[in-house]
Amino acid sequence: MRIRTYRTVVLGSGAAGLCAALRLDAEGVKDFCVVTEGLNLGTSINAGSDKQTYYKLGLCGSALDSPRAMAESYLTAGGADGDLALVESATSPRAFFHLANLGVPFPYDAYGQYAGYKTDHDPAKRATSCGPYTSREMCRAMIREVERRNIAVFEGELAVELTTRYLGEENGVPKRKVVGLIAIDAKGEPIVYRAENVVFAVGGPGGLYKTSVYPEAHVGSIGLAIEAGAATKGLPDGQFGLASFTDLANRKIKASAPFVPKEFRWNVSGTYMQVVPKFISTDADGVSNPREFLREYFDDLGDLFGRVFLKGYQWPFDARKVFGGSSFIDLCVFRETTVRGRRVFLDYRADPEGFSLDALPDEAREYLEKSGAAIPVPFARLQKMNPSAIELYRDWGLDLATEPLEIAVCAQHCNGGLDVDCRWRSVNVEGLYPIGEVAGTHGVARPGGSALNAGQVGAFRAAAQIAREASTNPGESEPTTLSLDEAYSSGLAKDPEISNLVRRVAKLATRARRARLAGVDWRRELEEIRTETTRVAGILRSGKELASASSAATEQWRRLTSESEPFELALDDGYRFDADERETLRVFQLFYARATLLRACWIYSASKVGSRGSSLAISPEGRTISEKFPEDWRALDEDPKYRDMALCAWTRTVDGEIETEARWRATRPIPEPDDWFENVWRDFRDGTIYR
């Protein structure tokens, strides 16, 4: 066992974590390190989809924009805090130009203007991109800078516990303080980190869903913070949409990727839909009984083709676009795959049966005409409008000219997460700074691409706050790494917080080995988690099913952590974890996250929030979606009284049981601060802005 002492640990090395490391260094903080499973792992460096767009304040042309106007765009769907929206808007230019200055090739014109385009839920042209791998370019630029600055990075380490100390309660909410964290390296050796601050940049809950566009390399570790007592906000507010997943076995891969997965996953948004491909479904073998299944849901082919076209820039499943809108397509695909057990493919090789340009709605036809793509066959239209979309799949060994593309409704992003204030501090765990997707800074829905901006802004805010506290509370020490024996001989191990961390390692070893003795197969348990979460907590949510699944999830946790084999490893029993024990501990935090998510989804249902965002609440009291759907598919309308409210929750484990406390609170409005320059300058000089 090794014991490392750092004042601040950045956990995670995606776009948010890397930015936090650079900003801490720029702010003069030296007593910190980055802990990661790998610089080439995670969502930011391995994904496209929402990660190909960067949302920022408008920086081109004559269109008027302001931080206030941009902040209002974040609040339109409800559930978002105005102070966070204002910070993300106001800081977006600074964060964006930080990336541009590091060499991220965002396009600008001959006059230096950074052009923009409209994205999901965006009333202005604020979005920008440097191609399908924008977040990868961001990560690579920041990795180069991290290496240039010789920032300490520990790779190959899996965090298995975030340790906190109980401080008491405030207004009924338990308050805690970060003590440190425990990781296990690739050889199975545990590493104890003693830290006052943890910048928690672990990404979204990618490991919770079976049909997912999160890259395989990303699982997510939000469960570590939830089990440590951190409050959550808006956990049920996920984002789902149509995405492809291509088995890469026996394919000739040309893509230059940091991590080669078993599947290549990608959103089928934009021109992939605007060229109006053919939707076919087959039996489970992927070949037998092919048919164009969408036709059974539409009486008018023009309506069908028009809604497929709209999926291009209305990509996320949206409860508001089900009745007569483009999100009806997602429901048809969901029914075909999840309910009927068939497989669905996009076929670009031939036009859908009955397709003609004249049958298209005016908006779609005019778009294709202006793009020079008013021609037969989806593949030809795609070749004309966006040839790089074809090359993207060819790089991964799939040619859209010769074979279909398998798709499903996939989990893509979590708009909720850990509850933070406008400095990106956990609202109830002192020293914890959740940034990136794991921070619940967005509401029910958000502009596409705002996730990348949020991660960068959160990094700026967290680093500035940590630097401020370090300057007002000096005592920075030289980082140290000691073996357990050296810690004992030096007296460091007598520090009560260090000794507690060491004892926690023994408890984690006990948990892992007890699970093995009980016959727990982490692979089987993980498959069960993903299948069940996709079924009950995806785009279609039933209160009855959520209640049952929530109870089953907490029971699963109790069963897996029960002391049916009562023993506890002593401090001198040895601590090396084998690969299965390491993965078992990873899955344990997913158990905890899943139980918390399902409980929150059930509370949404019990509160009768109704259908909103990327989920449709199914209830006998709801409206019939379509006569073509099952009778029990009745959607409950959104209750507008929850529009400006957020569900906040925290958990604790008592006698092996997960107990959740939750409350609805009003979302914070957009602040209206004094913007008189002399007053702002004074507050900036004396540090009032940090209070």
Image: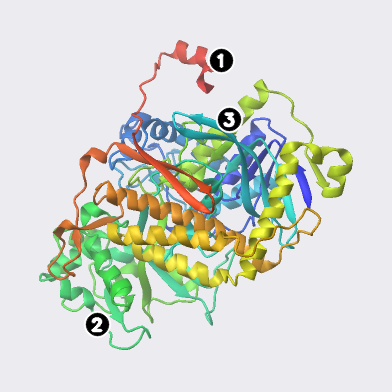
Q: What colouring method underlies this structural image?
A: rainbow
Mark 2 neighbour density, 10 Å: few (under 14) some (14–19) many (20 or more) = some
Coordinates of residue 675 in the picture (x, y in percent): 40, 17
Q: Secondary structure at mark 2?
A: loop
Mark 1 neighbour density, 10 Å: few (under 14) some (14–19) many (20 or more) = few
**On the image, numbered disc 1 is attached to which residue?**
685
Query: Do the residues bearing badges 3 and 1 touch, measured as CB atoms within 8 Å?
Result: no
Q: Amino acid at mark 2?
A: Arg
Q: Amino acid at mark 3?
A: Ala
Judged from this view, the residue extending furthest toward the right is 489
Instruction: Of the two numbered discs 1 and 2 on the same chain, state the one appearing first in sequence.
Output: 2
**On the image, numbered disc 3 is attached to which residue?**
464
Figure quadrant of residue 472: top right
Q: Secondary structure at mark 1?
A: helix
**On the image, numbered disc 2 is attached to which residue?**
291
Coordinates of residue 557 in the picture (x, y in percent): 51, 59
Instruction: Of the two numbered discs 3 and 2 on the same chain, state the one appearing first in sequence.
Output: 2
